Amino acid sequence: MITCLHGFLGLPSDWDFLRDAGFEIKTPPLDRIPDRGDVLLGYSMGGRLAVHALLGGARYRRAVIVSAGLGTEGERERAARRAADEAWAKRFEGDDWSSVMRAWNAQPLFGGHAMPRREGDFDRVELARLMREQSPAVLPPLAGRLHEIAIPVLWVAGERDAKYVAEGTRASGLLPNAELWICPGAGHRVPWEQPAPFVERLRRLG
């Protein structure tokens, strides 16, 4: 069983392709991560929260962390990130949905890849809350505690996602039992940009 955690603006249905490929999955809300299981798979914000859950005592046999950062370090950097996230939170609360989505997907982080999102699928107040409360500048940085995670971890980044390749390289060097996989032909949204290689890599987890 794979416990799948989506990222910000993610939906449980984003992971249907894994079910279609034959995996048994469950897709809990980000604020209700089960405290035990077989494989914990988290993408982007969900990946960070997966690491926080493991550090908080969640017991899994292994983890797969995709396109996730280690948090924001340094008070000046954290303040700047909080301000940026607050600006996004306000846009999600009140701006025209289509304009917010265009701006969100236009971020260099995504390299032009867009995932259609309907306003009716989301609670905009909840999106703003997530942006404020789960920000990497609000939660503690992770790097200093990665040595506490003893289970095998596969850390994944897309080859065109330079920032998160660097984060994955750093993380895999700090974790006691980690492997870094750089997915060819992918940016930040690895599972949906390159689903076939991603599925094949999951099949090799054992």
Image: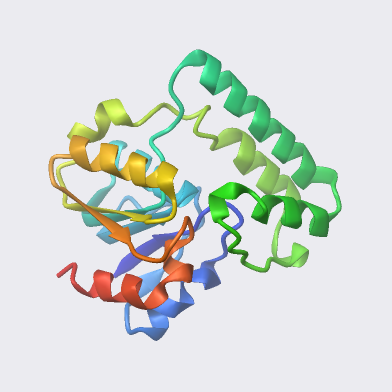
Q: Residue at position x 32%, y 74% from top?
A: 197
Q: Is residue 105 left or right of residue 11?
A: right
Depth order, front residue of 74/41: 74
Q: Residue at position x 56%, y 55% from top?
A: 110
Q: Is residue 136 left or right of residue 112?
A: left
Quadrant for the C terminus, please. bottom left
* Total tally of numbered discs in the picture: 0
**How is the protein colored in the picture?**
rainbow
Observer able to see residue 154: yes
Furthest toward the top, the residue is: 75
Rendered image quadrant of residue 185:
bottom left
Q: Position of residue 58 (x, y in %)?
A: 29, 46
Q: Position of residue 159 (x, y in %)?
A: 37, 56
Q: Is residue 196 left or right of residue 192?
A: left
Quadrant for the N terminus, please. bottom left
Q: Position of residue 69 (x, y in %)?
A: 41, 40
From the viewer's perspective, is residue 165 above or below residue 81? below
From the viewer's perspective, is residue 50 above or below residue 199? above
Observer able to see residue 51: no
Depth order, front residue of 135/181: 181
